[in-house]
Image (cartoon, grey):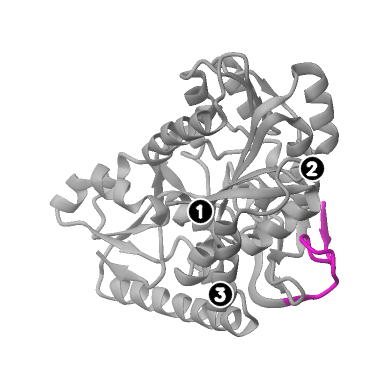
Amino acid sequence: MHHKRTTCRACGRADLELFLPLGDVALANSFLRSPEQFASERRFPLEVYFCRTCTMVQLADVIDPEVLFSNYLYVTGTSDTIAAHNVGYARTVVELTAAGKSELVVEVASNDGSLLRRFQDHGVRTLGVEPATNIAAGANAAGVPTVNRFFDSRCARELRAEHGPARAVIGNNVLAHVDDPVDLLRGFKELLDERGLAIVEVPELAEFVERLEYDTVYHEHLSYFSVTSLMRVCEEAGLRIVRVDHVPVHGGSVRMYAAPVERVREHAPAVRELSRAEHESGMASPARLRRFADDVRENRRALLELLDGLRAQGKSIGGYGAPAKGNTLLNYCGIGVERLPWTVDKSPLKVGLYTPGSHIPVLPASELLARQPDYCLILAWNFADEIRRQQAEYARRGGKFILPIPTPRVV
């Protein structure tokens, strides 16, 4: 169920150095159904390393993917922000690859099919590959053909034989989740037609470091990619990056477009320039990453001081959101029901459950107004603008929001 790597995922060297220990933490998406489950809950080390050889930032503790993903509670379709992102995403890919009615677009870890539906709007053939049985079933029922399995290079060969080659193979927030990203990308390459592109979106290391986004560390997120480390894994997989877009989703992500090395011999000059800028900024240098770890400890101290100060004044506090990132924050900071008695969430899959590790009850979003706490800690801070728009009435009645990242503050 759990093993520890000793070698780097990108370059294969046994040269990993621990820089950010976040403690023994419950799995971020393993919500609990009742208090009877609290005592038997498993915790695993959550520790971030960098490779001294190639600078790749990663976790060494690997949880069996069957445990993490076979029954999953994160559904992409619940956020307005993601919905708007998907419309633009599909349009860009269709224009870039000239995908028409006869071409196939495959999405790996396609979740509820929300992105593929936007490709269907363009009349393109689609196929989803999704390991979570519950979510794949929902996508199929909603008219998005979806294969329920884990994707790897062997799976790619079988899908190509059955469905034909693909004009685009897309993976959003999946490359960072697999223990062997090189094999995953080899599978993408295996599926492409002669004009096809492998397209991958991952949270960006620069944003992670600059904005102190330590709560985006959880056991599913095994790798934290820079453009430099993306180039490295692509080279190992026989791909070359032709374009990189910066996209604002999930606290700052990069979307890379890669072609087989047989068609494109080298990474695009603009991509190599991005890598050079990363080196010059020292963003993944040992000294910068150790300073990041110091800042994380200071964030915990400041957040607890803010919450405890408000409670000492007799102020009431509720939470908004029950995202995976919130569970890292709550567990690392030691925030339980005495500091945060409840949180609310829009996802019906999470309402009525308890957060992993911190055991905070998740209530329907309507409860924020019904209870009107003095302060609301936004755990899903990457959707803060959307949440503040939707909860304008709470603020109008005098409620104040707390944002925990990068510096805890009342807004």
**What x and y, as percent, mark residue 110?**
61, 32
Q: Earlier in the sequence, mark 3 or mark 1?
A: 1
**What x and y, as percent, mark residue 317?**
32, 61
Horizontal placement of 361 versus 230: left or right? left
Name the dominant secondary structure of the magenta segment.
loop
Q: Amino acid at mark 3?
A: Met
Magenta stretch containing residue 12, yes or no? yes
Q: Which mark is on residue 57?
A: none
CA separation, marks 2 and 1? Answer: 22 Å
CA separation, marks 2 and 3? Answer: 28 Å
Q: Residue at x 79, y 24 (%)?
A: 160
**What x and y, as percent, mark residue 386?**
31, 46
Question: Is 227 above or below relative to 19?
Answer: above
- Secondary structure at badge 2 equals helix
Q: Amino acid at mark 1?
A: Ser
Which quarter of the figure has residue 134? top right
Mark 3 and 1 residues: CB-CB less than 8 Å, in contact? no
Question: What residue would you read off at disc 3?
Answer: 283
The answer to whether residue 63 is visible is no
**What x and y, as percent, mark residue 59?**
71, 64
Q: Which residues are magenta?
A: 1-17
Question: What residue would you read off at disc 1?
Answer: 253
Q: Earlier in the sequence, mark 2 or mark 1?
A: 2
CA separation, marks 3 and 1? Answer: 16 Å
Question: What residue would you read off at disc 2?
Answer: 186
